[in-house]
């Protein structure tokens, strides 16, 4: 059936995989109609998909260093775009983004603008040139471009801090999904997610992660788009509701004005026993904030997400796997296309979900109905049972108001099929998609950290004579240790999924963006300047996070730069420190400056050769 090399048969292989997954979905629909319980369907969806990912991971095992670190640099452009999209569209994109728009409306669109725009920076400033350089990791570029182990170590420090913060959010997402789909506590769901993640990546490294991420993208995009089209047809919103979004948002604005948006006080919520982290509809979905400060907050958040995107090592590493520089550049374009399919739909999902919940013309509406009737609805009981939803009758009138229905923003996407009255099999599909999104990103993040510890710290700094077996052993041990630590932190739920992701972007841009960009585009940048830029940026950004963070000192932000935007402080300090110190120190030698010239030429050999 399959002749020739594996990469030549990828369209057939993933075509069969997609067909098989759709057949499984239809089989689950038949099973539900024949009386199979919702809990069993959820278990089957998760176990089936995770088993497939684990099988791909095992079949992709390798002891070749190039295959383990960069998938042998043979990943075709389109499939690398799919893998990058899966690596990128994390639990934040799949699980939390629509929830943020659901509760915050216009403001949260800054995440979409920034995350999408970041790939323009990746394409124009970094990806092709890092591929021409020939590095295995981002610290590998820093260490070779600027010279010296201390510069390499500083890059490792920033990478680990940003990636570790990011991966805790992904494992948080897996815990949220597993707790609902499997009917287990959140803490147990976190460890289920971790085991699943390690099964995909431990034996095959980047090679295994690449092919599982392609499989995960197929699942997550089907799981995200199918409910939107189904709900749209069911609610008579048209086949492509994306093009009628304006009228639906206007309908929400009309309903919110009709019902009234009453603010709950913190004291009232505490007295009512509302669990921490749950939100209520208190912000107009359709109204853009007014004033210069509101505009600045939108723009500044978009800037942080954009620059952070271009600084994240696990994303940049994906372009190290392409065959050549041209493929790396084209791969970014394909990445944007596959990411666009989900991001274009997130606002629509949030809008449809809210309409189905609050529009009295929809049979699924619960706002304005007697609370005892709402409490009897199966999906409401289930989500309240796992402490992801809550109802409080503040005015004791027995009728559910907008400010009396509480739900965690991170579960809006997961709950939407049930809110809309779709068969539970769709909820199982969405849970599998959310798990795929969180797992794919977590795989990339943990691998990025483990690989830089194995390659940049152990091999380059501690034992340059280490053989392949020992280097890969260190990488695999790193995967386990980092994963366990991240799962432990994630189980504490220190911040929301979107909050943790925003912090990760800010850490990355504070310490890595300008050392990377100036390392490619400014020959005068020196080792001392790069070290100053990384350390000053990271330290100043972290200090500012502690200064304004609500879980830390909680001081008044400067110019509206709050804890989600501290990267603006860090990156600004990094740029100034790097330029000043570089100009104050001796310029790089002729060989280094020639190396910088060479990486901006698409053709020719890579700058460094690995063994």
Image (spheres, grey):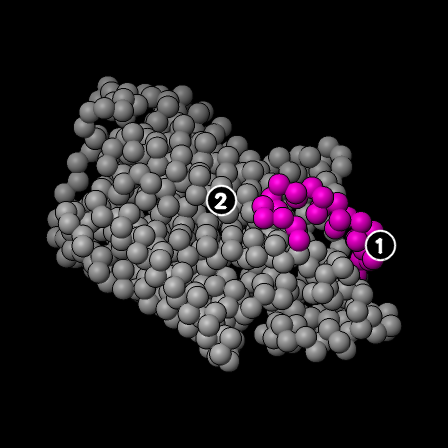
Measured as percent of width and height from the top left, residue 326 is found at 29, 29
For the C terminus, give its image quadrant: top left
Q: Quadrant of residue 378?
A: bottom right
Q: Is residue 552 at least partly visible in the picture?
A: no
Q: Nearer the viewer, residue 126 or 16?
A: 16
Q: Which residue is mark 2?
A: 341
Element on which disc 1 rests: helix
Q: Nearer the viewer, residue 65 or 460?
A: 65
Magenta part mainly helix, strand or loop?
helix
| Residues drawn in magenta | 236-264
Q: Quadrant of residue 300?
A: top right
Q: Nearer the viewer, residue 594 or 167?
A: 167
Nearer-N-terminus badge (1/2): 1
**Residue 424 left/right relative to 358:** left
**Residue 203 left/right relative to 21:** left
Q: Are marks 1 and 2 in contact (CB under 8 Å)?
A: no
Q: Which residue is mark 1?
A: 258
């Amino acid at each position: 059936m399959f002749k020739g090399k594996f990469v030549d048969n990828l369209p057939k292989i993933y075509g069969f995989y997609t067909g098989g997954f759709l057949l499984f979905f239809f089989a689950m629909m038949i099973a539900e109609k024949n009386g199979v319980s919702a809990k069993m369907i959820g278990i089957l969806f998760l176990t089936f998909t995770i088993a497939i990912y684990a099988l791909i991971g095992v079949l992709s095992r390798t002891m070749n260093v190039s295959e383990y670190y960069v998938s042998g640099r043979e990943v075709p452009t389109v499939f690398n775009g799919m893998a990058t999209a899966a690596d990128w569209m994390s639990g934040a994109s799949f699980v939390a983004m629509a929830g943020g728009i659901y509760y915050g409306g216009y403001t949260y669109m800054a995440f979409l603008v920034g995350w999408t725009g970041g790939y323009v920076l990746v394409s124009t400033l970094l990806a092709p040139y890092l591929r021409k350089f020939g590095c295995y990791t981002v610290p590998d570029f820093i260490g070779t471009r600027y010279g010296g182990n201390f510069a390499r170590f500083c890059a490792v420090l920033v990478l680990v801090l940003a990636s570790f913060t990011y991966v805790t959010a992904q494992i948080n997402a897996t815990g949220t999904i597993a707790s609902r789909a499997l009917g287990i506590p959140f803490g147990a769901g976190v460890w289920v997610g971790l085991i699943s993640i390690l099964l995909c990546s431990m034996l095959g490294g980047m090679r295994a992660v690449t092919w599982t991420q392609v499989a995960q993208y197929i699942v997550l995009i089907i799981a995200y788009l199918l409910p939107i089209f189904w709900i749209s047809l069911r609610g008579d919103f048209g086949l492509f509701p994306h093009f009628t979004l304006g009228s639906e948002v206007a309908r929400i604005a009309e309903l919110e004005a009709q019902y009234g948006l009453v603010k709950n006080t913190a004291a009232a919520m505490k007295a009512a026993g509302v669990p921490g982290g749950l939100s209520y509809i208190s912000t107009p979905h359709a109204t853009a904030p007014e004033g210069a400060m509101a505009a600045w907050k939108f723009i500044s958040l978009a800037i942080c997400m954009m620059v952070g995107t271009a600084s994240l090592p696990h994303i940049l590493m994906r372009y190290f796997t392409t065959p050549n520089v041209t493929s790396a550049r084209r791969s970014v374009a394909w990445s944007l296309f596959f990411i666009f399919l989900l991001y274009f739909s997130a606002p629509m999902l949030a809008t449809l979900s809210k309409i189905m919940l609050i529009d009295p013309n929809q049979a699924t509406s619960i706002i304005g109905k007697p609370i005892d009737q709402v409490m009897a609805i199966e999906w409401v009981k289930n989500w309240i049972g796992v402490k992801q939803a809550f109802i409080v009758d503040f005015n004791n009138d027995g009728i559910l108001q907008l400010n009396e229905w509480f739900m965690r923003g991170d579960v809006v996407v997961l709950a939407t099929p049930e809110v809309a009255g779709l068969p539970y099999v769709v909820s199982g599909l969405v849970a599998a998609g959310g798990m795929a999104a969180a797992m794919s990103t977590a795989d990339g993040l943990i691998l990025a950290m483990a690989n830089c510890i194995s390659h940049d710290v152990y091999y380059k700094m501690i034992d340059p004579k280490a053989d392949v077996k020992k280097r890969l052993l260190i990488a695999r041990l790193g995967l386990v240790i980092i994963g366990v630590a991240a799962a432990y932190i994630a189980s504490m739920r220190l911040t929301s999924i979107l909050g943790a992701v925003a912090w990760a972007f800010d850490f990355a841009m504070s310490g890595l963006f300008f050392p990377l960009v100036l390392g490619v585009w400014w020959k005068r940048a020196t080792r001392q300047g790069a070290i100053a830029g990384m350390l000053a940026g990271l330290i100043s950004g972290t200090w500012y996070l502690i200064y304004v963070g609500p879980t830390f000192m909680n001081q008044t932000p400067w110019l509206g730069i709050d804890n989600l935007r501290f990267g603006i402080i860090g990156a600004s300090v990094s740029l100034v420190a790097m330029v000043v110190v570089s100009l104050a120190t001796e310029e790089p030698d002729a060989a280094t400056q020639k190396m910088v010239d060479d990486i901006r030429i698409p053709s020719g050999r890579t700058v460094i050769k690995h063994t």
